[in-house]
Image: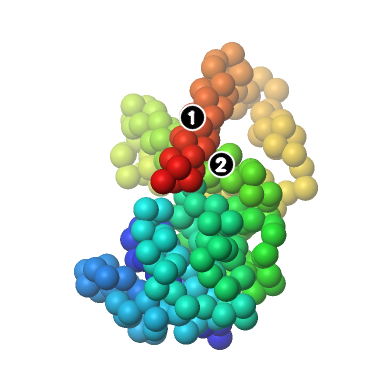
Amino acid sequence: MVQTSVIGCGNMGSALIKGLWRAGNHTVVACDLDPDALESVADYVDRTTSDVSEAAESDVVIVAVKPDIVGAVLDDLDLTPEQTLLSIAAGVSTDYVDARTDANVVRIMPNLAAETRDMAAAVTAEGVTDEVRTLLDDVGEFAEIDERQMDIATAVNGSGPAFVFYLIQAMAEAGVEGGLDEAHAETLAAQTFKGAAETVLRSDRDIEDLIDAVCSPNGTTIEGMDVLWDSDAKANVAEAVAAAEERSAELAAEFNDE
């Protein structure tokens, strides 16, 4: 069992806690100053605490707090070079964290699907260890990237779930308009996205080949794809990702100017 602490039990911190609990390979300590936040994750951890020093006793310490309080949390953390600190604070550079701790620092950008162990995460390649890789494997898939790519990764996998939810909603609403029950339409749309995503991850074929495999000549799918190919859908998705990337860079700049 890997001793793991999660400092900050908000949306992302609690998602990681629940995913690690489901994996069953971690002894988890949850740390937060908010009693309600601790109560919400109490069933998924070995113990809860409001004492950062108690959280600092773990092999891996995950700092899952908002960027504006990262500095204060790090000031209260006394870690050794044998420990690993994972930072998920958007816009907070590895250099900033590294200057405030003796621990091995790794920056990650996870997403909320960690709760169901379906997370997509970006992790800075520098400093990543097999221990970190195992932890990330326990809650989903990950890509090791250069830190300079973290803003675009934040847009793709950090903001991406909201974009996917929007598309699922659009497909489900189309199903309802066609006569499906709302619950049935949502199930079919969501499961279709889930299955398609798994196919992309598990198949050796590229995405264009997978599209072709579904598009029988003169069939129903190619009729729908012709509409998408003739539309601005791909450009609009790219624009949404670019806007999220730009905002990530702005947040990083604002943090570094403080």
Q: Name the amino acid type tagged 1.
A: Ala
Of residues 210 and 17, which is closer to you in this image?
Answer: 17
Q: Is residue 12 above or below residue 173?
A: below
**Quadrant of the rendered image containing residue 44:** bottom left
**Quadrant of the rendered image containing residue 81:** bottom right
Q: Name the amino acid type tagged 2.
A: Asp
Crowd band around label 1 with a 10 angstrom C-alpha radius: few (<14), some (14–19), many (20+): few
SS class, disc 2: helix
> Where is residue 123 shown, x and y percent of the image?
62, 56
Residue found farthest to the left? 36
Q: Is residue 145 above or below residue 205?
A: below
- The residue singled out by tag 2 in the image is 151
Crowd band around label 2 with a 10 angstrom C-alpha radius: few (<14), some (14–19), many (20+): many
Residue at point 53% right, 57% down?
Answer: 96
> Where is residue 124 shown, x and y percent of the image?
64, 56
Of residues 116 and 61, which is closer to you in this image?
Answer: 61
Residue 32 shows in this picture: yes
- The residue singled out by tag 1 in the image is 243
Marks 1/2: CA distance?
11 Å
**Quadrant of the rendered image containing residue 72:** bottom left
Residue found farthest to the right? 204
Of residues 171 and 175, which is closer to you in this image?
Answer: 171
